[in-house]
Image (cartoon, rainbow, N blue to C red):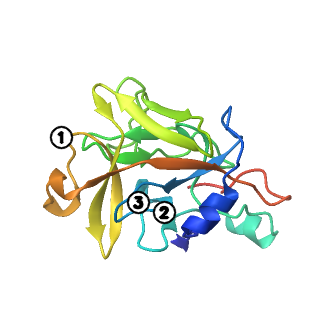
């Protein structure tokens, strides 16, 4: 687990462009921007699931030892998307999908679901619905599909929340009920890589 940056309100507003955002940036990271207990927390991926951490989130990434020894590993500290349903990684092919519990997940680098013995992710019930929407100061990452609209943050442990799509049938962790969850808006902010990196992580 590697810590990712907690972004306070002042930094968010400084980073946000004063001009309208007209198109999706090359890559972006996600922050909860609405009122509530998860406000201004980064959306981070760990062990294929997505979370909002207390103060600091956590991103789980991997870089091969030989690449690390040569000093060529990407940052790997933040969860970054290259489009609305794909993570920004060197290996590529890591798509974001919704599992049978309505949890937001990320596939392996071969595009296979980690939910059931490596089944391929099926677009008709998993990745359809994710989209990037331009805004006046920052973009928004949204989910709309089969009557489901938006995201939920469900209590996980020690102030950490797990990310689900906003369905009444969502099954939060540890046997909790869906009414313990809070809805949130995912702000999408352009992510700048260091000059020597071509992706945000080698593999998530």
- The tag on residue 125 is none
Q: Residues within 10 Å of mark 2 (few under 14, many from 20)?
A: many
Taking the spot 38% from the left edge, 23% from the top edge, the residue there is 124
Q: Nearer the viewer, residue 142 or 21?
A: 21
**Image quadrant for the C terminus?**
bottom right
SS for callout 2: loop
The residue wearing badge 3 is 51
Q: Where is mark 2, residue-wise?
A: 40
Left or right: residue 100 compared with residue 47 = left
* Marks 3/2: CA–CA distance: 13 Å
Q: Is residue 172 left or right of residue 79?
A: left
Decide which of 11, 54 is in the foreground and name it. 11
Q: Nearer the viewer, mark 3 or mark 2?
A: 2
Binning the other alpha carbons within 10 Å of mark 1 as few (below 14), some (14 to 19) or many (20 upward) gives few
62 vs 180, nearest the viewer: 180
Which residue shows up at 49% across the image and 73% down it? 56
């Amino acid at each position: 687990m590697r810590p990712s940056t907690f972004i306070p309100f002042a930094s968010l507003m400084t980073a946000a462009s004063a001009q309208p955002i007209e198109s999706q940036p090359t890559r972006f990271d996600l922050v909860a921007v609405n009122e509530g207990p998860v406000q201004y927390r980064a959306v981070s991926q760990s062990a294929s699931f997505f979370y909002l951490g207390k103060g600091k989130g956590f991103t789980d990434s991997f870089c091969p030892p030989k690449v690390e020894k040569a000093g060529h590993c990407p940052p790997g500290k933040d969860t970054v998307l290259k489009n609305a349903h794909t993570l920004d990684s060197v290996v590529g092919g890591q798509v974001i999908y919704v599992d049978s519990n309505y949890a937001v997940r990320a596939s392996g680098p071969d595009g296979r679901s980690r939910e059931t013995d490596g089944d391929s992710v099926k677009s008709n019930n998993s990745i359809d619905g994710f989209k990037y929407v331009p805004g006046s100061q920052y973009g928004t990452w949204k989910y709309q599909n089969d009557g489901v609209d938006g995201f939920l943050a469900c209590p996980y442990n020690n102030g950490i929340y797990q990310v689900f799509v906003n369905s009444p049938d969502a099954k939060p962790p540890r046997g909790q009920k869906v009414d313990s969850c809070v809805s949130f808006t995912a702000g999408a902010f352009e992510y700048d890589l260091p000059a020597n990196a071509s992706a945000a992580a080698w593999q998530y």
